[in-house]
Image (cartoon, helix red, strand yellow):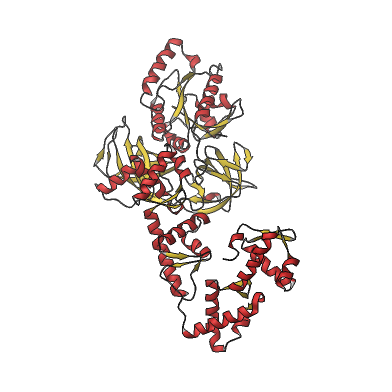
Amino acid sequence: MKHVIIGMAGHVDHGKTELVKALTGVDTDRLAEEKKRGITIDLGFARLDFPDGSCASIVDVPGHERFIKNMLAGAGGVDLAMLVVAADEGFMPQTVEHLDILQLLGVKDGLIVLTKTDLVDEDWLNMLEEDVKSRVKGTFLEDKPILRTSVRTGEGIEALREALHVLTLHAEEKSTRTPFRLPIDRVFSVDGFGTIATGTLIDGHIAVGDEAQLMPLGNKCRVRNLQVHGRNVSAVYAGQRAAVNLAGIKKESISRGDVLCRTDSMEPSLMLDVKLQNLPDSKRIIESGSRLHIYHGAAVRLAKAVLLDRDALRPGESCYAQLRLSEALAARQGDRFVARFYSPLETVGGGMILDEHPYRHKRYDARVIASLAVRESGSDEAKLVQAVGEHGADGMTLADLVACFDEPEEKLVEMLAVLCARGKLVEIAPSRYLTSSTLDRLWTDCETMLAKYHREHPLHAGMRLAEARQRLLRGKARENADAILACFAREGKLTLTAEHCALADFSVHLTKRQSAIREELLRTCRAAGILGKKQDALCALFDKKDRMECARVLESLLSTGELVLLAPELCVEKNVLDAVGTRVKAWFATHDALALGEFRDALGTSRDHALLVLEYYDRRGILRREGDVRRPGAQFGEIEK
């Protein structure tokens, strides 16, 4: 189901709250002071149901200029806008400011509602409609529907509901693949439940039981329960309003403006590179070094605006700038923000975040300007490299890129081939790409890691793959990590086996005494056959002075795979195990299954020992147990490797 947020906007006392009540039956003015004063002070929310069973969420915002901060906290995440204009007053100062804010936040669709139409005559309404059309010209509401309504008479309410339904059906669906992110606009506690945070989920999806993190402080918590408009749900998706019951954190540790996100998916920043716009009807000039109030999501930060290519930004102009924040902010590239003048406090502009973790720039640096230009409006190839680079070691698949770029798959395939030929991208696995710079960085880390390991473990054949993945690519999918290591092996930088990886120029060097111990260990294990030898029994073959060396050589033989641990402490020579594997392979050439008794008889050993061998094959995926028998497993072809 598509999830859509409809945001109300308009001047104070133009009937926004009454309109929401007429559409949904919900009075969004919940505060006693709101009831007393008859105006909306803080955000209100309601569920709008449509006849086909679909629904949308409506966010009612304050219209008074004193509460613009609260309006901005609710405007983030809005998909569609309902600009409300009272028929008896027309456009007013906050109507203009709210429209500017919606424009700055990148809202792309919506409609205009004329309220209180029962208070004026037809001629006045016709004249007002023409005025409204001229006022919204050049904005996202140009040529959008203008609907006449009266909550007192009921005029136009059903027509408005249907128009909102049509807009909802055509609204762009948000991706749920990105890590979840919920800017918090309200926090409170409930007896028996604990801490509750509310907000609009603007990215990804969140489920009961998920681990989460609160930014910018980084406190970790867990999602205990979820509600959407008072109904318990197991998951919430981008575009839904949610109440999140959090375990492991106190209400006092959370503030409006904090961001609830997937653990380790965001990192707060004190600087942002942005495209900054000064509104055409702004009365202020933004000079480099000016202080601005920055509104992002539900957060507000004081920032110094460093203009990167000029000294002053005049009304109607835009430029690249670096915002240096008074407090850390958690944001993502592509996010929109609103800027208000430091004093007097009025909306002057806003823009888009181009880089959420930039270096501190010098002004008039041509390279910085060029880099930001690519981020904003570079060539398709440049943006493609940039998109892949932003995903770091995860890289991107062709399917990911098709979802991100409005281009035919065939064209993307051609661009990817050209970029790989130029060395900008590397196809680490079929249809999965990383940037060359990302791979270079990963190789530097890998080389440093393995060099250190070889120094500390000179008799080991290399680092175990599982350990290498964990250290080098923690949290990355195993398939992706293996593809990166395989890429290094193809480039001749490291050697890779099924169990270990090592630098290409590394080899195990044994002393003369260690070589003698090695031969004795192998001879003893070979003689023991499939019964093997325990490690302490092998070490007991040598004098006390050699037992330390024996332990080292034994560890080396296990790392190279010349000896195999059939069970904890029980060593079997690899060649002996390979001979057994040959017999198992031959058995399945003429049989569908292998029973324990049959295997015991074939080995001529005890039932318990035969079971140890079968369980070893089970662990490796060579065989799989089905009841009392074994059948070939997914890795059956590896039986003699």
Say which of 152 and 610 sits in front: 610
- Could you tell me how many numbered marks the image carries? 0
Say which of 575 and 562 sits in front: 575
Q: Quadrant of the N terminus?
A: top right
Please say whether residue 371 is visible from this viewpoint: yes
Residue lying at 55% horizontally and 22% vertically, measured from the top left: 162
Decide: is 235 above or below 394: above
Say which of 120 and 237 sits in front: 237
- Residue 266 pos. (x, y %): 46, 50
Residue 72 located left or right of residue 570: left
Please say whether residue 83 is visible from this viewpoint: no
Residue sitting farthest toward the front: 590
- Residue 554 pos. (x, y %): 55, 78
- Residue 184 pos. (x, y %): 50, 43
- Residue 542 pos. (x, y %): 58, 87
Decide: is 554 above or below 412: below
- Say which quarter of the image contains residue 187: top right
Say which of 517 and 380 sits in front: 517
Residue 577 located left or right of residue 333: right
